[in-house]
Image (cartoon, rainbow, N blue to C red):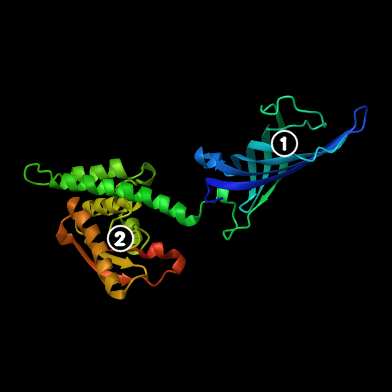
Amino acid sequence: MFNNRFGVRLDLGYSSFKDETSFPFKSNYYRASIEGIVNVGDVLRFKDWTNRFNLLMHGGIGSASLNITEPEDNGGDQIIALNFGITPQYKISNSMSLFLDFSSIVHFNQEDNFDGGPNLSPRESNISLFNTSLGLSFSLGKHRQLADSYLNEEKENYIALEEKNKRLAAAEKEIETLKNKEISSTPNQELIITELDERYVRKEEKVTPTNNANTALLKKLLNGGYINVYFDVNKTRIQDGSLNTINTLRQFMLDNPILNAELIGYTDETGTEKRNIVLSQNRAKRVFDVLVAAGISPARISYFGGREDKSVSEGARQLARKVTFTIR
């Protein structure tokens, strides 16, 4: 497989035909063909509903030789062979699958029949074989995963990240438009946050506004680092999944006008220290700007860069690219 959708295969076949009754004959059939493979399961997005079943289609051209030994040696009949087939698969593991192949081999230029008699229409494709195979496929590649079902973690993360970036870019564009729209010479702050809620925060991500009953709990969660705003690598754009966090903090501060918030930006350990100092501060500044645009007085918010967060392991660097809160 060149990738998880297209590939080629070399098909080799051997068959023996014989009859020892009233008209005895013996013949041997050899075949080789080169074929293209299409991963139909990937094209039709089978992974949207199953991780076990898949379907391949293949087709190509090759050469075959029919060697008749009885009733008399024909010296070998050279044939053009077209091979077409479908291959349902059942994935047992990432490196092994069970397959059932159905192939039809169509012959051209076949001078003799399999029983040694002459083919009266050698120029026509009136002789063909149907072959069924049951077997196992094994991965021998460096990824140790079958290529026709392979989608590595990096690509999955890239697809998810692209979807998030599209949502965030749309959100920022809408917010910028609303900020620049004059209504009585002042931005419509309530409309800005409404657009955030209704258009760009998933329904399952929303939480109810704060009230007196949960103020203490939310303050504890915010100060304890349980509620943060997260960013992608080397970016100051807020991840779309963190927009609800900003809305939660906004509502919390509206419900508690005597409290102030301190925003602390962080980076992971990649990049230079000088760049990470600037990046951590810019991330905190980005959250500050969104809160101010959403109606929170800048006098109640401060921000600064906390540099690199070295408390997380290399495999959890996503958790280091963040802005945390301290409520006083």
Task: Label 2: state its secondary structure.
Answer: loop
Res 88 quadrant in image: top right
Q: Position of residue 288 (x, y in %)?
A: 21, 59
Kindly tell me whether residue 328 is visible in this rendering.
no
Q: Which residue is mark 2?
A: 235
- Foreground pick, 177 / 116: 116
- Foreground pick, 64 / 86: 64
Residue 131 disc label: 1
User: Could you tell me which residue is drawn at 33 percent across and 54 percent down?
Assistant: 239
Q: Is residue 180 left or right of residue 156?
A: left
Q: Position of residue 266 (x, y in %)?
A: 31, 67
Res 11 quadrant in image: top right
Q: Position of residue 299 (x, y in %)?
A: 14, 61
Front position among marks 2 and 1: 1
Task: Give neighbour class at mark 1: few <14, some 14-19, many 20+ (Cα, 10 Å).
Answer: few
Q: Is residue 51 left or right of residue 80?
A: left
Q: Quadrant of the C terminus?
A: bottom left
The mark that comes first in sequence, 2 or 1, is: 1
Task: Label 1: state its secondary structure.
Answer: strand
- Foreground pick, 91 / 303: 91
Kindly tell me whether residue 91 is visible in this rendering.
yes
Q: Is residue 127 left or right of residue 45?
A: right
Q: Amino acid at mark 2?
A: Lys
Task: Give neighbour class at mark 2: few <14, some 14-19, many 20+ (Cα, 10 Å).
Answer: some
